[in-house]
Amino acid sequence: MTAPVLSIRGVSKSFGGIRAVRDVSFEVAKGEILGLIGPNGSGKSTLFNCVLGQLRPDEGDVHVNGKPVSGMRASELNKLGVGRTFQQLSVFPQMTVLDNIILAGQEHHGTMLSRLLGKPDAGLTGQAEELIAFFRLDHLREEKAGSLSYGQQKLLDAAMAFMAGPDLVLLDEPAGGVNLTMLADLRERLQTYNREHGASFVVIEHNMEFVMELSTRIIVLAEGEIIAEGAPEEIRANQSVIDAYLGS
């Protein structure tokens, strides 16, 4: 049996007297798209940050491809095949689309010495061009990121996250602020990448239509605990979810 790409076991995290995450456990299989939903304050971001090493769990552990990663730095996680997008865009507005994607790849490519002595693009232009084409940003290749629409910047942000060829990508509200037309394109591109490359996704999202159509499985958090888990159609019909989140 193939080991899960991500395994979260008994993770808890408190801040003072407030327990933000309570004994959360789940796994993400290779090629799975997992949606993580819940009302504000349910613990989603805290759990994400425990996975990404920005917070260390008080209890429990996190494994990526069978390796313990609790407390690892982002650069170490990248080398293990973990990418992420942020709720706040991480693009560089004064750089071109192409240069943004190359810069994202350089972080994961070789050593500092090899980057200093090697080609200015670290030999990554070809790979960056492929991602530009995949995310349908060809016509914007030489445009500065700051001149793009918000939805186009979201696509660029996603392309940057995939530059390292990750096994696992954590997406933090990818649909936030994106218009319906661009949203459909983003969802289709993510599903295609998942299908063609077998990458696993964990998606925090408040846009219910987007996350339900994108995900193969949904986990619902409320007050730091898992209250429901299942296929999107099961979650839609779950009364406890309706009471805790969808009906709020």
Image (cartoon, rainbow, N blue to C red):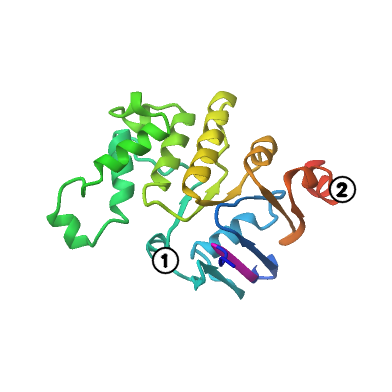
The front one of 201 and 29 is 29
How far across and how far down the image is residue 98, in percent? Answer: 29, 36
- The secondary structure type at the circle numbered 1 is loop
- Residue that protrudes farthest toward the front in the picture: 1
How far across and how far down the image is residue 21, in percent? Answer: 67, 65
Q: Name the residue rendered at 32%, 56% in the picture.
A: 108
The front one of 14 and 62 is 62
Q: Residues within 10 Å of mark 2 (few under 14, many from 20)?
A: some
Q: Amino acid at mark 2?
A: Gln
Is 163 a magenta residue?
Answer: no
| Residue 128 appearing in the image | yes
Q: Name the residue rendered at 39%, 44% in the picture.
A: 160
Residue carrying label 2: 239
Is 115 placed above or below 91 here? below
Q: Which mark is residue 133?
A: none
Q: Amino acid at mark 1?
A: Arg
How far across and how far down the image is residue 223, in percent? Answer: 74, 59
On-image quarter of the C terminus: top right
